[in-house]
């Protein structure tokens, strides 16, 4: 049957219309994301050089802060290592700072062992612990460095495309990326529920994912780490209730019962599954700002590249985010 043959007779969901209530502040934050204003605090200047090593081995010249600063600029402006070295050197000259500039080989070598600060999960208040996180998970593919599409088209190369799968965990309230893992394409999404939950430092109130997470292992991973967390995953169309559905229904059984009584669209609204679109928005923000490929050539450096990208996107989101009000 041709695609969309009965499109004129299908039920069309009207597109929601929303209005930004804090447009002046959000507009200013968007301009600030592209600002080239750079300054070094006294603490950063002091911490730029590495502390003297007390054990045997070579003495590092640059601290973790210096390497992280260089890799952050590389991710924001999508530069190669040599161009990053040139950018850092020009900034030092413009600011009149007498600080050493890490060369491209040092950046490549230190990227394999750099520890990037993990993102904070939840909202922190003075004197209070973090609030529970409503975790939204999704995945996407990132291409690896290789022959460009133009070379493949011109020379007829039949090399298989190499790529990695990026799994993200997004805080539904703040939009921050609080967990990220990188796997090979043969790893399914459900198996990464546990590693994503391990990256979240605080408590988790709910775990929301698409149909790929409709697995017993996902429910078990959430229950093991956060017994009181809700799992919001749409059951498959062929799903059947468990054997204990009548006297001891599971969360999945309750989802099936609500879908049978009120329909799948009503279940999405009642369960909060519609918030999962914010995870897709985070992936779209990643592809737009960072790009759709990984430039590192080893797994260790690729993991650091992902951590730096998460650090950059969360920092940009801290500058300001829009507040919406639905109008239609």
Image (spheres, rainbow, N blue to C red):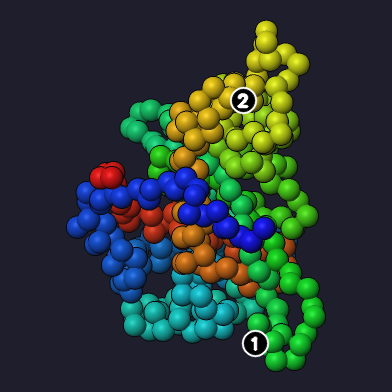
Asked if one can make out residue 112 in the rendered structure from this viewpoint, the answer is no
Q: Quadrant of residue 155?
A: bottom right
Tell me which label, 1 or 2, sits earlier in the chain.
1
Q: Residues within 10 Å of mark 2 (few under 14, many from 20)?
A: many
Q: Is residue 86 visible?
A: yes
Residue name at image x 34 percent, y 65 percent: 33
In the orientation shown, which residue stands out farthest toward the left?
A: 24
Q: Can you tell which quarter of the image residue 4 is in? A: bottom right
The dot on residue 89 is none
- Which percent across, then down, holds residue 314? 44, 54
Q: Residue 125: x, y in percent?
A: 35, 33
User: Dot 1 surroundings within 10 Å: few (below 14), some, or many (20 or more)?
Assistant: few
Quadrant location, the C terminus = top left
- Name the residue rendered at 39%, 36% in the picture: 124
Is 242 displayed left or right of 122 in the figure? Answer: right
- How far apart are labels 1 and 2 at the CA level? 49 Å
Mark toward the viewer: 1 or 2: 2
Mark 2: secondary structure: helix
Q: Position of residue 213 (x, y in %)?
A: 66, 39
Query: Residue placed at 46% from the left, 28% from the top?
Result: 270
Q: In this view of the protein, which residue sits in the foreground, 59 or 5?
A: 5
Residue sitting at x 69%, y 87%: 153
* The image quarter in which residue 316 lies: bottom left
Residue of label 2: 256
Closest to the observer, 159 or 87: 159
Residue at which label 1 appears? 150
Q: Residue furthest top?
A: 247
Residue 211, horizontal then vertical, whole percent: 64, 41
Relative placement, left or right, of 130 versus 50 is left
Location of the N terminus (image quadrant): bottom right
Q: Report the front residue among 184 and 297.
A: 184
Q: Is residue 165 left or right of residue 41?
A: right
């Amino acid at each position: 049957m041709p695609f969309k043959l009965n499109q004129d007779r299908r039920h069309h969901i009207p597109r929601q219309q929303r209005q930004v209530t804090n447009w002046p502040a959000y507009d200013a934050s968007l301009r600030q994301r592209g600002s080239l204003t750079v300054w070094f605090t006294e603490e950063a200047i002091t911490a730029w050089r590495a502390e003297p090593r007390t054990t045997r081995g070579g003495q590092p010249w640059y601290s973790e802060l210096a390497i992280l600063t260089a890799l952050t600029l590389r991710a924001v402006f999508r530069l190669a290592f040599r161009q990053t070295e040139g950018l850092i050197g020009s900034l030092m000259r413009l600011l009149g700072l007498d600080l050493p500039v890490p060369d491209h080989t040092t950046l490549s070598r230190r990227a394999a062992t750099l520890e990037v600060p993990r993102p904070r999960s939840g909202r922190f208040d003075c004197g209070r612990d973090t609030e529970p996180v409503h975790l939204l998970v999704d995945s996407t593919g990132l291409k690896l460095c290789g022959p460009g599409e133009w070379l493949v088209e011109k020379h007829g190369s039949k090399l298989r495309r190499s790529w990695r799968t990026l799994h993200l965990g997004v805080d539904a309230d703040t939009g921050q990326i609080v967990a990220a893992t990188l796997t090979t394409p043969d790893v399914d999404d459900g198996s990464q529920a546990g590693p994503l939950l391990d990256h979240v430092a605080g408590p988790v109130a709910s775990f929301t994912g698409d149909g790929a997470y409709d697995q017993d292992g996902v429910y078990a991973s959430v229950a093991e780490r956060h017994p009181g967390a809700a799992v919001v995953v749409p059951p498959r169309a062929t799903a059947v209730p468990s054997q204990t559905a009548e006297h001891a229904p599971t969360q999945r059984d309750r989802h099936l019962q609500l879908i049978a009584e009120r329909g799948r669209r009503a279940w999405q609204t009642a369960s909060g599954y519609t918030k999962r679109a914010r995870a897709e928005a985070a992936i779209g923000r990643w592809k737009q700002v960072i790009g759709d490929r990984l430039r590192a050539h080893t797994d260790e450096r690729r993991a650091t590249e992902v951590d730096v990208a998460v650090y950059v996107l969360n920092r940009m989101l801290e500058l300001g985010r829009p507040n919406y009000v639905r109008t239609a």
